Amino acid sequence: MKKKRDREGMVTAALDLGDSESLATILSPDGDVVDSFSMSMSDDGYSSFASKVPKDARIAFEATSMAYPVSRRLTALGYSDITVAHSKELAWIVKSKKKNDRIDSLKIARLHMAHMLPESHLLSREEQVKRDLLIQRVTLGKEIGKMKLKLIAYLKREDVYLSLPESSDSFSRERRQAIRSMRFGGDGDDDDGRDLVVGTMMDRLEFLERQCAPLEEKVRTIVRDSEDIRRLMSIKGVDFYLASLASSYVGDVNRFPDDDHLASFLGIIPESWDSANVKRRGHMSKEGPSTARWAFSVMTDTVMRYNPRLKTYYLSVKKRKNSGSLAHVATMRKLVRMIDHMLRYKENWRWEDEASTAKKLANLDREAEAKTTGGD
């Protein structure tokens, strides 16, 4: 409440952001429109904004692709009370019958003045870079997986896949060499193009694989000392990258009032709706970051392999709801609750295998040390 009282009497400014031009609305402490003007997203535009809006003003704008650069520019100009509005919870603006930038800017300003603006979280530059690196690594992993499946499918179609050396790894060194040495046209020069197809697919696969090492090295350097990541690695089956990706989305868990808010942010809650006093639940809302849901989905599958309690919970929900997808969402939600508790109270996994955790952390430290000293 003190924060609200301190903000009484302050000027409120709202921006409806555009790529090249934005619309600003300034409200007096009494809620009257003092000014409404367009500003270019250039040095001159920001200078114009700074000349009209006092530095102690409360500023708000919607979370769009421009939110980060605008927030950084305004902070550099000396503004500190900046709020970013949650886009999806402001959907009613888009649906307005009188949709235009001036009206949108005014609505955001009035909501902000009334302390009713649904807030979104902007990452610091360091957090943003960390997440970007991890997302690139995840994206590469997915592309590598797809490329391998395409190559296997092609070799099966040409009836040569079973002739590859036996191996538990579909792309072991021996198998790669065998694929590279294949000649569909025999020893002559009558290649009909299939050698080129396979060679090109292998080149693409190996190109993608080579991109992983520098990303992995940089990620280790940035996040190896994170206590939250090390804590998440105490969950058996959760490796450094999965823990890092999950942590990058959770951030400081204390920014969420409770685990329900964390699950809602991640989109890991079943959709629900009411009709005639009957509450129904459907599939996952999917309103959070898709990569975050992917990370927690993989983590849930991994943890269930090692934790019989979570597996039992999944099976019980599946039997009760007669739906594997609903059971999976419910299990993800339960895991999020556990992770929220771990990070909030700085506790390791309740069923931690200490030897397994120690081995993972030792490998992480050893790999990071090897990169630092230039060792192998």
Image (tube, rainbow, N blue to C red):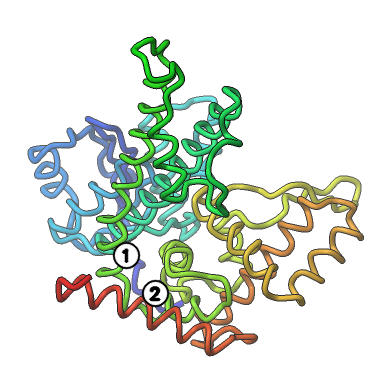
The kind of residue tagged 2 is: Lys
> Quick check: 15 left or right of 111?
left
Which residue position is annotated with label 2?
3
At 44% from the left and 48% from the top, the residue drawn is 174
* Residue 267: quadrant of the picture: bottom right
Please, what secondary structure does the residue beneath circle 2 have?
Answer: helix
- Residue 19 lies, with reference to residue 271, above or below; the image says above
Out of 117 and 205, give the one closest to the viewer: 205
Q: Quadrant of the C terminus?
A: bottom left
> Quick check: 274 left or right of 344?
right
Q: Where is residue 129 in the image (x, y as percent from the top left)?
A: 28, 57
Give neighbour class at mark 2: few <14, some 14-19, many 20+ (Cα, 10 Å).
few
Q: Position of residue 25 (x, y in %)?
A: 30, 42
Out of 214 and 100, give the one closest to the viewer: 214
The kind of residue tagged 1 is: Gly
Please, what secondary structure does the residue beneath circle 1 have?
Answer: loop
* Residue 342: quadrant of the picture: bottom right
Out of 299 and 59, give the one closest to the viewer: 299
Q: Position of residue 216 (x, y in %)?
A: 31, 60
Q: Which of marks 1 and 2 is in front?
A: 2
Measured Cα–Cα span from mark 1 to mark 2:
12 Å
Which residue position is annotated with label 1?
9
